[in-house]
Amino acid sequence: NAGVTQTPKFQVLKTGQSMTLQCAQDMNHEYMSWYRQDPGMGLRLIHYSVGAGITDQGEVPNGYNVSRSTTEDFPLRLLSAAPSQTSVYFCASTSGQGGDQPQHFGDGTRLSIL
Amino acid sequence: SQQGEEDPQALSIQEGENATMNCSYKTSINNLQWYRQNSGRGLVHLILIRSNEREKHSGRLRVTLDTSKKSSSLLITASRAADTASYFCATDARSGGSNYKLTFGKGTLLTVNP
């Protein structure tokens, strides 16, 4: 099994550009989430989904959109990139909806906004 | 806002020594999880402890939970250079209904010197 796959691994954007970070999992997990990791800040939740067609905001949702049309995929869209969105982005999935199961993480997308 | 906070922020030890990291949180939880992150990689789940458990073991890992003090500790015994990584605690917090959000602390950077 591939687990959680994130693409691309690295990306450089100019301010104002838009892009989509891809996340796919092959474990049939209902719950998926996006985090950003900044130095000294730990991981902060951007958006999450408890199943296809259902999404909700996390701690830092501004500037990001998500949708969940299938169980496998959970893309994150940057609408108009800003330098403050320079970060490492992680996608994670887990079975169930409670915090009683481990989360499986991808290896991240390193995004730089110039 | 961060739910869990790890202490210390950084820890440097010699191979063979034990490493202890602490996590404090603010609100009541159902479960607490510990994750490891090697440099440039995603997070890997280590151990989950439920609110009605006080101690849990997995190989060289020992986790304790004190719900009265809202704190947890992760002990790595007989450390190895390969244990060098950042360690995060994560707690669940109900966000209305049955949905939950897993909140991560800022992490402890452990360096094990050969």
Image (cartoon, rainbow, N blue to C red):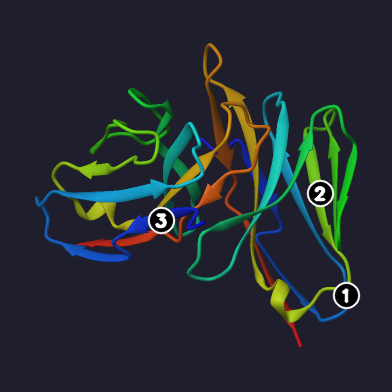
Q: Are marks 2 and 1 on the same chain?
A: yes
Q: What is the count of numbered marks?
A: 3
Q: Which residue is mark 3?
A: A5
Q: Amino acid at mark 3?
A: Thr
Give the image location of residue A43, x and y in percent.
Answer: 49, 48
Disc 1 residue crowd, few under 14, some 14–19, many 20+, Cα 10 Å: few
Task: Residue lying at the far bottom in this picture: please name it.
Answer: B114
Q: Quadrant of residue B56?
A: top right
B90 displayed left or right of A61 = right
Q: Amino acid at mark 1?
A: Glu
Secondary structure beneath disc 3? strand
Q: Which residue is mark 2?
A: B73
Give me the residue at 53% from left, 11% from top. B97
Give the image location of residue A64, x and y in percent.
Answer: 25, 38
**Label number found at residue B17:** 1
Q: Quadrant of residue B16?
A: bottom right
Q: CA distance from mark 3 to mark 2?
A: 31 Å
